[in-house]
Amino acid sequence: MTNSITTYTSENRGRALVLFLLFGLAIYQFVNAGFSAFAMVCLSPVLVLAVYVAFTWKMTAFWALFAINYTVMFFGKQQMLPNGIPTSLYNEMLELLLIAIAIVDAREEPKFERTANLMLYALIAWCGYCTLQVLNDTCDLGINVGNWYSGARMMAFQLLYIFLVFSLYISTPKILHQYLWVWAFFCLFSAFWTWKQQTFGWTHAESVWFESVGYATHRVNGIIRYFSTFNDAATYGCNAAAAAVAFIIFSITTKIKRDRYFFLIVAAFIVKGMFASGTRTAIVCLFAGIMVYVILSKSIKIAVPVILFAGLAYVFLAYTDIGQGNSQIRRMRSAFNKNDASANVRTINQASIRKYIQDAPWGIGIGTNYNNVPANNKFRKLSTIPPDSEYVYIWVHAGPIGITTFIITMLLMLGGACWITMFRLKSRSLMGIGAGFTCAFVAIQLGGYANQILMQFPNALIYYGGLSIVYILPFIEKDWVQMEEKRFAEQQERERLKLEKKKASRV
């Protein structure tokens, strides 16, 4: 056994080093989460079993990651998760495990060449900046590696993990098609749970949360904002808007009728849930995502009806009182009210931040918050002002330099995805998938500009993962076309047989 390990290490020094670093990072995650050595020993059989299952059935681990990411906040709110385990730990451990498996299999299944693209370089730049933030001592609190890492892993490192996992495991047209359907079913579950909350009310755990933590933000002017399976209504609404954009585009670009009708039905249920969330930003996200598709489609036939529909919808919400009796439409319509009170509060908060942040070009530090900034500290005010936005949060903690770096990296990633969708792909349906993920990414970024939802579960993995998929589409296009032609021929054959049966019944 020792000889085999020695041989493997000598022949694969680079991979062995990376695996060792991943293992060390995983152990640090456990220690940082507050697990004692005894607890780690007790958990070791479960971890060994999980690792064995993951190495034996690799895609099972990937689907488990997606399912856990989508439902972890739901089960947490229902008080069905064990206490003491950070919510993010479930995701991160699976992501690190999947990356480790890919490294071990790199010789048999070389896929890492797919990761060398603009998105990887942009994420490395962002992670590099956030790594430098460990030295940021703007608040004169000393360097605290634990606090820094807790913030940096959510703000930056998880994005790199997500990119690698999706780039390595969405490797065939079949898996990509399965991914679209799996995502659709989870969206339908959220739509169902919204209907359940509206029709039958909250569960006991949801009721406790709503009447305590959520009451101030989820009952506005007598309107109840439904949060479905998500942490809050804002996260749900923006997620629903971005998902609806994606599935609308998938439905109008696929050649397979079964997919077209299914994705269109899914989009309709998602939009219904989006309105129930009462998240005003969501309607802007939906419009913006669709308008981006008008550009990516390069089609006048698509542009004219979409622009016309978007214009009519805008006039309906901004300049009419039609449907004002519906509380959710009333809530969405307030997004176009320039005198809205909550929007004005955000403007005032941002003006205060701008005044203080001038003396903190690197921000107050990643992982620094009101819990560890003393009351007499110059930057105490910055740590207590509600950011109300993911972009403002990054602005405060990483500074003007940090938010500039973040915006540039996001634009680079988005620009690369747009280029691939518009100029590198030839298949219309695959262009539709690329456009769907790209437009959804734009929509969720707008949501992050207005609300602190960008890095929340399940948004980061779904939408950064979706953008990662766009970058691997050119590698699978040939196989995708073959799979689609086969499915289309089967569809034509079913229609032919159905028509013959219909004609025979008339004789």
Image (cartoon, rainbow, N blue to C red):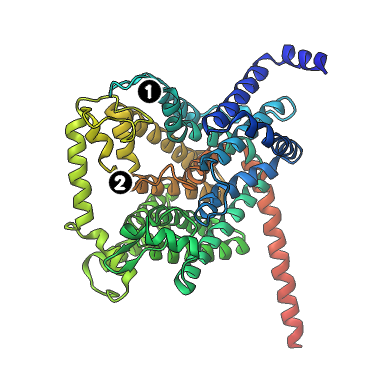
Q: Which residue is mark 1?
A: 133
Residue occupying the far front of the picture: 38
Residue 221 x/y as whole percent: 26, 66
Going by the numbered disc 2, the residue's amino acid type is Asp
Residue 202 x/y as whole percent: 47, 67
Check if mark 2's residue and mark 1's residue have beta carbons within 8 Å: no
Q: Kindly identify the residue that appears in the image at 46 percent across and 58 percent down.
A: 244
Residue 307 seen in this snapshot: no
Residue 295 seen in this snapshot: yes
Viewer-proximal residue among 74 and 175:
74
Circle 2 SS class: loop
Q: Kindly identify the residue that appears in the image at 69 percent across and 69 percent down.
A: 495
Residue 391 x/y as whole percent: 32, 39
Viewer-proximal residue among 195 and 37:
37
Viewer-proximal residue among 492 and 466:
466
Going by the numbered disc 1, the residue's amino acid type is Gln
Left or right, residue 151 beside residue 251: left
Mark 2 or 1 closer to N-term?
Answer: 1
Circle 1 SS class: helix
Q: Residues within 10 Å of mark 2 (few under 14, many from 20)?
A: some
**Quadrant assignment for the N terminus:** top right
Residue 147 x/y as whole percent: 42, 28
**Quadrant assignment for the C terminus:** bottom right
Choose top left, top right, bottom left or bottom right for residue 398. Answer: top left
Residue occupying the far bottom of the picture: 507
Position of residue 126 relative to residue 60, above or below, is above
Left or right, residue 466 beside residue 138: right
Q: Which residue is mark 2?
A: 388
